[in-house]
Image (tube, rainbow, N blue to C red):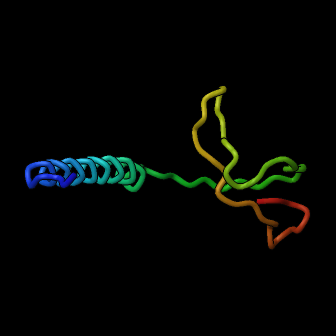
């Protein structure tokens, strides 16, 4: 059975509309992340930071306020982490 021209047109419109909605959804989600305000803080620790890794949540009074972006050794004093 051959699809009629009207059926092909409706299918094309449906596929186009679906792709357009998907693109709008992705753009809105990615756009929100791109324009999100970011503030960086720098901290040094002399005690162990074991268990802490990039991507870990930073919490203040139980509320997530950010995430760890990187961890390294302080070049001025290798006994400290930053």
Residue 41, percent across and down?
Answer: 60, 53
Total number of numbered discs in the rendering = 0
Residue 43, percent across and down?
Answer: 71, 53
Query: Which residue does the image show at 40% across and 56% down from the upper left?
Result: 34
Query: Which residue does the image show at 8% across and 50% down from the upper left?
Result: 6
In the image, 2: left or right of 62?
left
- Quadrant of the image occupied by residue 71: bottom right
Query: Which residue does the image show at 19% across and 55% down from the upper left?
Result: 2
In the image, 70: left or right of 76?
left
Residue 40, percent across and down?
Answer: 56, 55
- Quadrant of the image occupied by residue 65: top right
In the image, 62: left or right of 25?
right
In the image, 58 versus 11, the foreground residue is 11
Identify the residue at the far top of this view.
61
In the image, 23 versus 13, the foreground residue is 13
- Whether 72 is drawn above or below 57: the answer is below
């Amino acid at each position: 059975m051959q699809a009629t021209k009207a059926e092909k047109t409706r299918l094309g419109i449906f596929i186009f509309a679906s792709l357009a909605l998907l693109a709008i959804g992705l753009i809105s989600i990615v756009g929100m992340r791109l324009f999100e305000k970011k503030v960086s803080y720098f901290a040094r620790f002399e005690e162990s930071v074991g268990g802490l890794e990039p991507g870990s949540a930073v919490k203040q009074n139980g509320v997530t306020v950010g995430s760890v972006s990187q961890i390294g050794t302080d070049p001025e004093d290798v006994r400290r982490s930053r």
